[in-house]
């Protein structure tokens, strides 16, 4: 098991910023591609961003490119999602996810996503 706990969600005005954190508790954190997904009530969960276990390569959904940045700290065993220039359509529950030894493209494109562990989510609300 690799429990994942998200934090940092909240309410922000359009154009503002938030930083989400995902703390992992378990072994072999540096063998997992880590990712963020988001989901609105009644809709399918969609991919947002991912970072390879090497910590450098990243992959983003087109809707967030240039606005969001994913990063990881293997010492703290934590993944971050820095969200800038937020829009009302970014309002969703955001979920942290872990996929062991999985290519970035597979996390982003496979349906359903091949994820080993999910966090419980943190709510982001962007007002107009």
Image: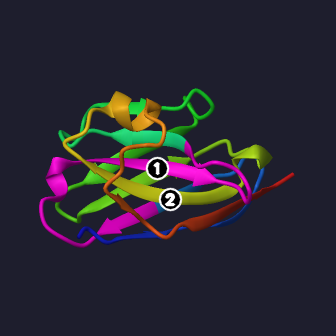
Q: Estimate the spatial distance between the alpha carbons at disc 2 and disc 1, rounded to whole Å.
A: 6 Å
Residue 66: x, y in percent? Answer: 55, 29
Does dot 1 land on a helix, a strand or a loop? strand
Colouring scheme applied when the structure was drawn: rainbow
Q: Nearer the viewer, residue 117 or 59?
A: 117
Residue 59: x, y in percent? Answer: 40, 31
Q: Nearer the viewer, residue 56 or 121?
A: 121
> Which residue shows up at 53% across the image and 32% down it?
61
Which quadrant holds residue 67? top right
Q: Which residue corresponds to mark 1? A: 36
> Which residue shows up at 25% across the image and 68% down it?
2
Q: Is 44 inside the magenta-drawn segment?
A: yes
CB atoms at circles 2 and 1 under 8 Å apart?
yes
Q: Is residue 101 left or right of residue 80?
A: left
> Which residue shows up at 18% across the image and 39% down it?
54
Task: Tell me the number on the disc at residue 95.
Answer: 2
Extreme-front residue of the structure: 112
Q: Callout 2 environment at 10 Å: few (<14), some (14 to 19), or many (20+)?
A: many
Q: Specify which label sits upstream in the sequence, 2 or 1.
A: 1
Q: Is 74 inside the magenta-drawn segment?
A: no
Residue segment shown in magenta: 21-46
**Is residue 23 positioned above or below 29 on the image?**
below
Task: Tell me the number on the disc at residue 88.
Answer: none
Extreme-left residue of the structure: 28
| Total marks placed | 2
Residue 69: x, y in percent? Answer: 46, 41
Q: Is residue 61 left or right of residue 50?
A: right
């Amino acid at each position: 098991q690799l429990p994942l706990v998200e934090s940092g969600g909240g309410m922000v005005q359009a154009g503002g910023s938030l930083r989400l954190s995902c703390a992992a508790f378990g072994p072999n954190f540096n063998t997992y591609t880590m990712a963020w997904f988001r989901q609105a009530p009644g809709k399918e969960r969609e991919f947002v961003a991912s970072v390879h276990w090497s910590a450098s390569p990243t992959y983003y959904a087109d809707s967030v490119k240039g606005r969001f940045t994913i990063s990881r700290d293997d010492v703290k065993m934590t993944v971050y999602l820095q969200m800038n220039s937020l829009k009302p359509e970014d309002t969703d529950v955001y979920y942290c996810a872990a996929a062991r030894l999985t290519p970035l493209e597979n996390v982003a494109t496979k349906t359903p996503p091949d994820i080993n562990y999910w966090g419980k989510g943190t709510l982001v609300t962007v007002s107009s």
